Structure formats: C-alpha cells, structure tokens
Amino acid sequence: MINLKYFFKGFASIKGVGSPAIALGASFIAIGALLKNLGFSIQESIFSTFLTYALPGSLVMAESMLIGASLINIFIAVWLVNARLYPMTVSLMPLLMHKNQPRWKYYLSCHFIAVSSWLIMKDNYENIGKENRIDFWIGIGTATWSVAIVSTVIGYVASDFLNKDILIGLAIVNPIYFICMMIGAMKTIQISLSVALGTILGPAFYFLSPEWCILFGGFTAGTIAFLFGEKNGK
Amino acid sequence: MANNILIVIFVTSLATYLSRFLGVVSAEKIKETSKMFRWFNCLAYSTLAALIARILTFPSGTLSEVDYLIRIIVVILSIAIFYLTKKNLVYPTLFSVIILSFFSSYL
C-alpha cells in the first residue's frame, strides 16, 4: 500500500542540517503554552494540532477566541489566513500524482501540507522517481506532523516555565527558518521575483487591508513574477 | 460569546482543510509542465513571502513587544549565519531564538 522504503526516506528529512524540527518544535511549543493559557485541556490541545496542523490558523483561532468572535467569524478568519495552502497544494500535488497510485493518498496526505513540509518536498522531489513521490511525501508529512503534535504537548506541560522572554525567542524561529528555506529555493527568475515582490507587497498591502494583505499582496507579486518570468526565460 | 472548545477546533480545522482539499481537486487537472502550474508555483512562493514579511513587520503576538530595529537585526544576522554555515538551517534557527531571548531580557 505504502512503499516503506520511500516513506522512511521521507521521514528521515527531520534529521540533519536541513532539519525543520527546531523551527517546528519551537513554534508548536509556543502554541501548546498559548492553548493552555486559553483554557484548553491537554487532549483538546493535541486534538487542535492533530486536526489543523497549520500554525497561523491556530494563532488566529486563539486570538478570535480571546475576543469572543462568533463561529462564522472564526471560520472566515482562519480560512483567510490559511488560504495560502490552496496555491501551495496546486503547485505541489501535480508533482506527486501518478496513475499507479490510489487517489485517497492525495486527499488524505494533503492534510500534511504546511510551509515546512512543502518547502522540504519542493527541495527534494527531483531526487525521487515520480511513482514513489507520494510515499516519500507521506513520510515527510508524518514526520513533521508528529514533531508538531509532540511539541504541542511539551509546550502545554512546560507552559509554567516558559516566561515572556523565552516565548518571544520562540516566536522568531519559524519566520527565520522560512526565510532561509526560501532563500535556498530562489533558483529561477520566477521564484526569486515571487519571493522578493511578496516580501515587499505583503506588508505594503497591510495599509490597505490588514486581513487581505497576504492574499492581495501574494497574488499581485506572484502574477507579476510569473508574467515577467514567462517573457524573460523563467 | 463562549464557544465550546471542541467546536472551535473543528471549525478551525475545517476552514484549514478546505484550501488543501480544493487544491488537490484543482491539481488533478493541472499538468506540472503547464503555464497554469508555473503561475500557481509563483503564487505559492509570493504568498508565503508575503505572510512571513507580514509576521515580521506587523506581528500580532509576543513578537510585537520587540523593537522593530531588533527584529531586523536578528533577521539579517540569521541570514548571514545561514550563508556562513553553507546553508545549514539548524544554526540560524537556534541562533535566532537565543539572541532574541537575550535581547528582550537585557535591552
């Protein structure tokens, strides 16, 4: 059903110099502590990371609960901040699809799409034969997802020991990891331009609309980068 | 309004899975060699960059308590370490958490 050789090869991506474990761990430890302070039980905290597994979404959920937002407002706010997962999925899944593989694997494993696992897969897919990529991906996903769940538990249990200065330190790790990963991915004109323009336009659009700035800024930046790259040899 | 925590978790995960699910549905019709694929690839990277830049310039949580200048310095130093260590990801991430905790306790 799942080729274990490729599964474990993917799973092993959490080891080594490119490991996302520290960045993922740091941010989900912070989430665990945050959820405890919000009044979640440990089971509820585990359940939250288990089912959502997307950091900005969990943060928005926590913020919305603090201000007492309604369920429909929580749904919209989370959907908005996690809508980036749509282009990420569309630009990953065609690389993994193979006629010999059952479709349920794709619909189930899309749950593992998060920034770190996505960047790792994008960095490694060319080294894996197309038929085996989905099993490799499920390995990466299981590994990063497990780190997130375990870290949520650690953060929940250790929340009394995590003072404000440590939590501030933990909050920077994830952005730093993503920046470094993206710089490493800037190998074509299109990707380099997408990253550079997105970095400028995301915050710039914040002045027009704080809620929509990521989607508007990202869409504008990505489209300009695409058109420029198509005209100038990718 | 006090919502049941389990329902909130469920709503959050549904709102998140929706984008992933629709992504797979669309991906079934898109070839990896097509223009459409390249466009979405650009959109994915640019949206990520926009998200990270937003988190760092207009943070909402604990990061907002750190001075703007310190955030920029930590980012630049971490990128420098990333290059100095031949694109090792462990060192810059470890460095960033230590240096920022240090800055926020002593400055």
Image (tube, rainbow, N blue to C red):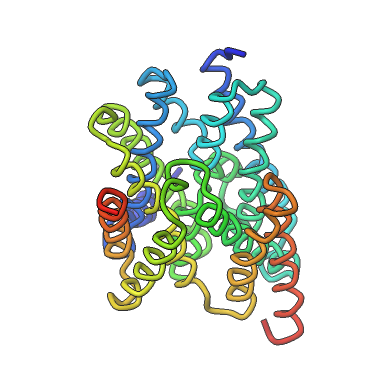
Left of B89 or right of it: where is A207? right
Does A148 sit above or below residue A172?
Answer: above
- In front of the other: B39 or A1: B39
Q: Position of residue A16 (x, y in %)?
A: 26, 62
Q: Residue at x 70, y 54 (%)?
A: A207
Q: Residue at x 26, y 48 (%)?
A: B105
Q: Position of residue A100 (x, y in %)?
A: 57, 53
Q: Residue furthest left?
A: A161
Q: Residue at x 52, y 17 (%)?
A: B6
**Residue B27 visible in the displayed image:** no
Q: Position of residue A171 (x, y in %)?
A: 39, 47
- In front of the other: B29 or A100: B29
Q: Residue furthest bottom?
A: A232
**Residue A198 visible in the displayed image:** yes
Please identify the quarter of the rendering in which residue B4 is found: top right
Left of A88 or right of it: where is A135? left
- In front of the other: A151 or A91: A151
- In front of the other: A102 or A38: A38
Look at the image and tell me in which quarter the N terminus of chain A lies.
Answer: top left
Q: Position of residue A113 (x, y in %)?
A: 53, 48
Look at the image and tell me in which quarter the C terminus of chain A lies.
Answer: bottom right
